[in-house]
Amino acid sequence: MDLIKGLSQILGNNLITEREQKIPYMTDASYFQGDLPLAVALPDTTDQVAAVMKYCQDNSIPVVARGGGTALTGSSIPLKEMLVISLARFDRILEVHPEDRYAVVEPGVKLDNLNQHLSRYGFFYPPDPASSIAATVGGSISTNAGGLRASMYGTTKNWILGLEVVLPDGNIIHTGGKVLKRTAGYDLTALMVGAEGTLGIITKAIVKIWPVVESRGRILAYYDTIDKVGSSISEMKGMGITPLIAEFLDKITMHSLSETRGLTFPEDASYMLIVDIASTRESIGRELKEAEEVLRKFNPISTEITTDQAAMERIYEARKGAYSSLLSERSSMSERVVIGDIVVPASELPVALKESEEKVRKYNLTVALFGHISDGNIHANIYADIADKDHMNRVESFQHDFATIAIRHGGSVSAEHGVGLEKKDLLRMEFEETNNQYVMEIMKSIRKAFDPKGIMNRGKMFDQ
């Protein structure tokens, strides 16, 4: 049977079959190179998605759903003979109800566009990955994205009330609802969050929204050693101070931002800490001073407080663009950036950061360490020459040891970027090291129950 002809009958002109037009869908924001997809579907209704899924299951065609293409672990790239289902045309904001604290949106809505729209009501949607200019609601749900504001508001899973999902057999289900709490059997909404498109395709989301903060200010602190950065955040959280944002940058990252964004930093600073405090207009000054006093306990090179919103926005956008800025630090155009993404409890940050720095030296790699430090999230951007086998072996060894640091200190090998292709072995290692292998078997059983033919994002998260 001509599979393309059958798909064309369902999708009409919403099907890409020309080789040149399919090539951009072979990659995402990770360093992985996928295979040329069988075709690319661009459905514009849930019924079309359902018809495509039923056809794919009946004909055993593997599929991968795609949002904004910003995935960092290869979770949205096609493998052999896969159909890519792009949700790009599902880009409408359907409802906004400030009084009930929710909005209904389609999965192709970009996060920045959503927040621009919500700002008219004085509300926002807190999940804030650095790629929010391109990242979509559906993609961020599928990876349980975190971001800069996760310190105060948590990750995506805390902000999803309900979903419309097309299952592999074409059935359409609705999970959750429009209320802020409910107890009604198994929480299938939560099950879909972080599933990386292995259980179904999200076609609508009911998201929780929140009032914009009244006032915020920022503290910039510079340190000479990485353990002081971790200690200052651990102390701050132990005293009950919850930052809106707490980010740290190393010298490589600061240099890249100087080169690409024109920002200036103290020459003798090895690490920069950005701490935002949100409060009322009446108390913001006092709370900023209290937070600064904690940071000064650990002998910073200097500290600075500002409530200048324009200056704060420049640094905020620079931090969100750190990944692209770091590309300027490559020694050759053939280098790629492999991104480590671990998380540890805040109390373990000082020693975990120090150990991470030691592993960089051990393997003689160029690695930029930075991340959402307030929630224990450490990113390691590793400069990797994928054509050099010895170099890649050292990169893989560092990734293994970096993940081991997370596990040893009660954390996880993946904080917010998902598992995809990159972290399948590390995920298995985490379950083995914590004597929790049966959890992975339960996950596989759930996946098989939803997708008995194994067509959904085959080869990602773990081998089925």
Image (spheres, rainbow, N blue to C red):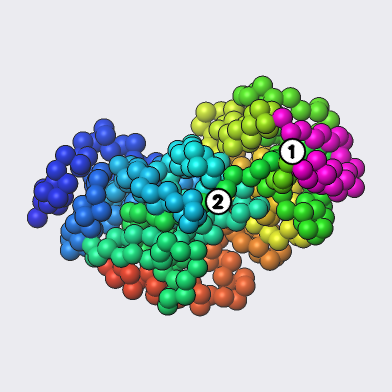
Helix, strand or loop at disc 2? strand
> Which residue is label 1 attached to?
218
Can you name the residue that lies furthest to the front here? 99
Q: Is residue 125 left or right of residue 401?
A: left
Identify the residue at horizontal 61%, vertical 61% (top origin): 412
Residue at position x 62%, y 48% in the image: 149
Which comes sooner in the sequence, label 1 or label 2?
2
Q: Does 305 lie within the magenta span?
A: yes
What whole-number distance in Å separates the C-alpha atoms at marks 1 and 2?
A: 21 Å
Residue at the spot x=29%, y=48% of the render?
A: 84
Mark in front: 1 vs 2 = 2
Q: Secondary structure at mark 1?
A: strand
Where residue 284 appears, as percent x and y from the top left, is 76, 43
Give the magenta range: 282-308
Image point (72%, 46%), residue name = 279
Residue linked to disc 2: 210
Left or right, 166 with reference to 410:
left
Q: Nearer the viewer, residue 231 or 177?
A: 177
- Can residue 181 be spotted in the picture? yes
Position of 184 with respect to 360 (left or right) is left
To which quarter of the image does residue 421 belong? Answer: bottom left
> Residue 254: where, in percent of width, then height?
70, 32
Q: In the image, residue 461 lies at what x, y percent?
A: 45, 60
Does 124 appear in magenta? Answer: no
The amino acid marked with disc number 1 is: Arg
Q: The N terminus appears in which quarter of the rendering?
A: bottom left
Query: 10 Å neighbourhood of mark 1: few (<14), some, or many (≥20)?
Result: many
The correct choice, above or below, for 186 with respect to 231 in the image is below
Left or right relative to 431: residue 290: right
Q: Nearer the viewer, residue 233 or 152?
A: 152
Which quadrant of the figure contains the C terminus?
bottom left
The amino acid marked with disc number 2 is: Trp
